[in-house]
Image: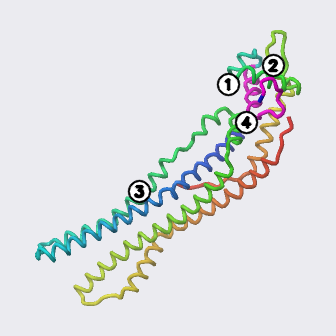
C-alpha cells in the first residue's frame, strides 16, 4: 500500500484497538496512541483521518485524539455484530 | 457484552484446540503400529531363539518357561507403550496460545477470527475423525491379539491338565466378543466424540459462510 494512499477498507482489528485504547484513556496525542496500539505513526494517522471523516474521533485544542459518541457506539455495534454470529455457534463439549 | 464475546471466543478456540489434539492421533498412528509390530517381532524372535537353542544345544533347562513368560510380557508391554505413546503425542500438542490475544478483549477476538484458516480447520476435523476411527480399530485389534494369545495359553493349560480343548474358531470368536464387551465404554466414547466432531464441522461451516458473507458497516 502506498504510504500516502488513504484507507479504503479498514482492518476491523485495528479500528477496534484504536477505539478500545481511546475508551480507556479518554484522550491521547497521536504518538502515545501509536505506542499504545502498537502501530506505526504513519499508519495510525491514516486510520485517524478515516475515523475522523466518519465522525468516530475528533481532535481537541491540544491536538489530542478523542473518541466521539458515534465512535463509542460503533465499537459497541462491532462487538454486538461479532457476538451475533459467534453467539449462534453451539460448540460441542469434548471430553479428554 | 465484551466479556460475553471473550467467553464465547474462548469456547470457540478451546474447541479448535481439541481438534488439534485429536488431529495428532493420525500423526502418531505410524508410531503406534511400529511399536505394536516391534513387540510382535520381539516376541517371535524370543520364540525362534528359544527353539533354535533347544535344537542346536539340545538342552532346555527351563529356558522355554523363561521364554514363554518373556513372550507373554512383550505383547502387552507393546500395547501399553503404544497407547501411552499416542497419549503423550496428544498431550504434547501446544494449545491455548490464543489466550494472550484474547486478553485484549474485543480486538483480540477480532484478530483471532481474522487469522482463522478455515480450510485447515475443516481438514483437521476430517483428520481428527479419521484418527479416532483408526486408533479405535487398532486398539481393538491389539487387544484382540492379546486376548487370543492369552486364551490359547489358557486352552493349552486346560488341554495339558484336563485333556480337553476348545477349537481355534471358538477361541478367536470368544476373544473378539470379550474384547468388544470390555471396550464398550471406550467404543461408545469414541463414537460420541466422532459425532461431536461432525457437529463442530457443521456449526463452523455455517459460521464461516455467514461470517464471511456478512459486512460490517462502520
- Residue identified by numbered label 3: B84
**Which residue is depicted at the point 70% across and 22% down?**
A40
Badge 4 density bin: few <14, some 14–19, many ≥20, Cα 10 Å: some
Q: Is residue B137 above or below residue B28?
A: below
Chain where mark 1 sits = A
Q: Which residue is mark 4?
A: B2
Looking at this view, is A54 or B40 the one in front? Answer: B40
Percent coordinates x, y for residue B188 in the rendering? 55, 67
> The N terminus of chain B is located in which quarter?
top right
Badge 2 and badge 4 in a common chain:
no
Task: Find numbered disc 3 in the image and state the secondary structure of the residue it sits on.
Answer: helix
Q: Is residue B33 above or below residue B149?
A: above
> Element under label 1?
loop
Pointers 4 and 3 within a single chain:
yes
Q: Position of residue A48 (x, y in %)?
A: 81, 23
Label for residue A25? none
Camera-side mark, 2 or 4: 2
The answer for how far apart the CA atoms under marks 1 and 3 are is: 44 Å
- Residue topped by disc 1: A38
User: Which segment is the magenta one?
Assistant: A2-25
Tell me which chain the residue with mark 2 is part of.
A
Which type of secondary structure does the marked residue at label 4 adopt? helix
**In front of the other: label 1 or label 3?**
1
Between disc 4 and disc 3, the foreground one is 3
Dot 4: chain letter? B
Badges 1 and 3, same chain: no
> Marks 2 and 1, how far apart in space?
18 Å
Amino acid at each position: 500500500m502506498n504510504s500516502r494512499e488513504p484507507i479504503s477498507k479498514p482492518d476491523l482489528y485495528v479500528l477496534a484497538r484504536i477505539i478500545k485504547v481511546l475508551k480507556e484513556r479518554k484522550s491521547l496525542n497521536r504518538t502515545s496512541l501509536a505506542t499504545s496500539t502498537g502501530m506505526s505513526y504513519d499508519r495510525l494517522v491514516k486510520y485517524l483521518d478515516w475515523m475522523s471523516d466518519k465522525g468516530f474521533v475528533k481532535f481537541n485544542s491540544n491536538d489530542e485524539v478523542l473518541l466521539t459518541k458515534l465512535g463509542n457506539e460503533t465499537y459497541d455495534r462491532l462487538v454486538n455484530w461479532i457476538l451475533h454470529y459467534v453467539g449462534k455457534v453451539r460448540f460441542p463439549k469434548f471430553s479428554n | 457484552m465484551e466479556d460475553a464475546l471473550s467467553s464465547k471466543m474462548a469456547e470457540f478456540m478451546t474447541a479448535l484446540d481439541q481438534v488439534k489434539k485429536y488431529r495428532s492421533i493420525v500423526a502418531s498412528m505410524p508410531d503406534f503400529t511400529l511399536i505394536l509390530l516391534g513387540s510382535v517381532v520381539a516376541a517371535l524372535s524370543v520364540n525362534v531363539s528359544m527353539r533354535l537353542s533347544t535344537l542346536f544345544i539340545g538342552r532346555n533347562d527351563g529356558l522355554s518357561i523363561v521364554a514363554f513368560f518373556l513372550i507373554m510380557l512383550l505383547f502387552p508391554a507393546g500395547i501399553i507403550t503404544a497407547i501411552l505413546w499416542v497419549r503423550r503425542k496428544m498431550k504434547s500438542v501446544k494449545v491455548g496460545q490464543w489466550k494472550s490475544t484474547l486478553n485484549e478483549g474485543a480486538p483480540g477476538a477480532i484478530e483471532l477470527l481474522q487469522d482463522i484458516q478455515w480450510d485447515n480447520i475443516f481438514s483437521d476435523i476430517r483428520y481428527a475423525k479419521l484418527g479416532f476411527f483408526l486408533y479405535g480399530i487398532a486398539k481393538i485389534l491389539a487387544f484382540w491379539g492379546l486376548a487370543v494369545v492369552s486364551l490359547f495359553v489358557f486352552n493349552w493349560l486346560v488341554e495339558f491338565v484336563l485333556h480337553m480343548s476348545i477349537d481355534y474358531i471358538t477361541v478367536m470368536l470368544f476373544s473378539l466378543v470379550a474384547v468388544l464387551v470390555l471396550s464398550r465404554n471406550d467404543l461408545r466414547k469414541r463414537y460420541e466424540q466422532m459425532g461431536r466432531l461432525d457437529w463442530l464441522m457443521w456449526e463452523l461451516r455455517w459460521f464461516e459462510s455467514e461470517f464471511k458473507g456478512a459486512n460490517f458497516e462502520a
